[in-house]
Amino acid sequence: MNKELVYIILALGIGALTIIMAIIAILNKKLSIAVIAGGVVSLFASILFLLMAAPDVAMTEASIGSGLATLIFFYVLNKIKKYND
Amino acid sequence: MIKNFLIGLVLASFVYMFYNLYESYEPKTELTGIAAHYAENGAKEVGAANLVTAVVVTYRGFDTMGEVTILFLTASIIGFFLKLSKADEDRVIVHKGTSELLITSSQILVPIIFLFGIYVFMNGHLTPGGGFQGGAIIASGIALSIMANPNREINHHAILWIESLSGIAFVMLGILGLALAGGFLDNRFINLGTFGDLFSAGAIPLIYSVIGLKVGAEISNILNKYQKSQKES
């Protein structure tokens, strides 16, 4: 088993997981689960960027996409909940 | 029914578009045009081991200034829309405490995350990453410390001063390049030094440190605004 094949299988598996997470983010009725699934999409995307030899893009995606964006979404969700009650 | 049909139509046109892109794609065997110039002369002209940094900071430095400006605008617009009234500003809300696990791990992790962020932007000319990445990592450290202690107040004035001073320093370094070397944001007004050293590549470590501080302060400011907006009744 050569190295390139392992990379391709890994990339395909992570790509499939990304798509599954994206579908969960769209279809789930509970907003907090949807937000977390959106963060996980970013996390898997950053691993994909790393596999495609772009470590600087991966760093940005991991910290902004899955860290800060998720936190800001939760702040907004908390605010919406206050108005809905 | 008609709604689903329209959604399907949009999806099908996307598939058609991307399939055309995929069909016409041919991998290039060698660099051409300006990419070849960067790859051949980048190390000699700029002295940065990381060619991406050489392009982002010097060859295309003006674009980077535009990006920093866009981020600054975003932070200001968020600050404008999340402005609190005087009564809300003075209100004291005590959030629920978080778990012991998160508090203890944040005490260990936050300094390490800060250190890693500073490492990333100081070594932007040698290793992958740079000002934007380092700044985002520092801001994610601040996000962790807020999550561990939701009642923490970020020093607003410190963020403001770091952001403004580093923005001014960035433009000043650019003008120094214009005055002493070839053009705006030219890094060669400081000696290029030995290729691959920490203090090499002229002004690139300085410029990237300033960008990193600016980006970190801006994103922390956005987080601070969202945290404060929870006070609004």
Image (cartoon, coloured by chain):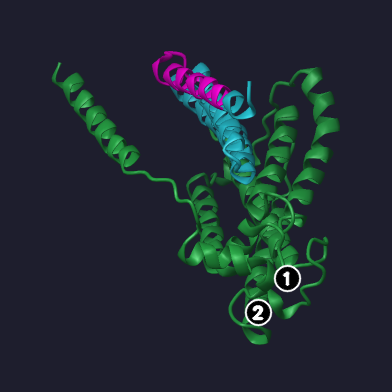
Chain colours: A cyan, B green
On screen, residue A57 versus residue B121, left or right, reads left
**Residue drawn at (58%, 38%), measured in percent from left and top?**
A61
B41, A2: nearer the viewer: A2
Which label is found at residue B203? 1
> Mark 2 touching mark 1, by CB under 8 A?
yes
Horizontal relation, residue B135 to residue A49: left or right:
right
A21 relative to B139, above or below: above
Image mark count: 2
**In which image quadrant can residue B58 be found?**
bottom right
* A15 inside magenta stretch: yes
Mark 2, residues whose alpha carbon is within 10 Å: few (<14), some, or many (≥20)?
A: many
In the image, is residue B68 above or below residue A25? below
Q: Amino acid at mark 1?
A: Ala
Q: Position of residue B125 (x, y in %)?
A: 72, 59
Q: Which residues lie in the magenta part?
A: A8-31
- Secondary structure at badge 1 equals loop
* Quarter that holds the N terminus of chain A: top right
- In the image, is residue B175 above or below residue B215? below
For residue A44: magenta?
no
Residue at numbered disc 2: B177
**Image x and y of residue A36, in percent:** 55, 22
- By secondary structure, the bulk of the magenta-drawn segment is best described as helix
Cα–Cα gap, marks 2 and 1 = 9 Å
Closer to us: B82 or A54:
A54
Point out residue A78 in the picture as x, y percentages from the top left corner: 54, 25
Q: Residue furthest top?
A: A29
| Quarter-of-image position of residue A6 | top right
Residue placed at 84% from the left, 24% from the top? B104
User: Seen in the image, is B150 located left or right of residue B73?
Assistant: right
Taking depth in this image into account, of B149 and A19 the one nearest to the observer is A19
Label 1 Cα neighbours within 10 Å, binned few <14 / some 14-19 / many ≥20: many
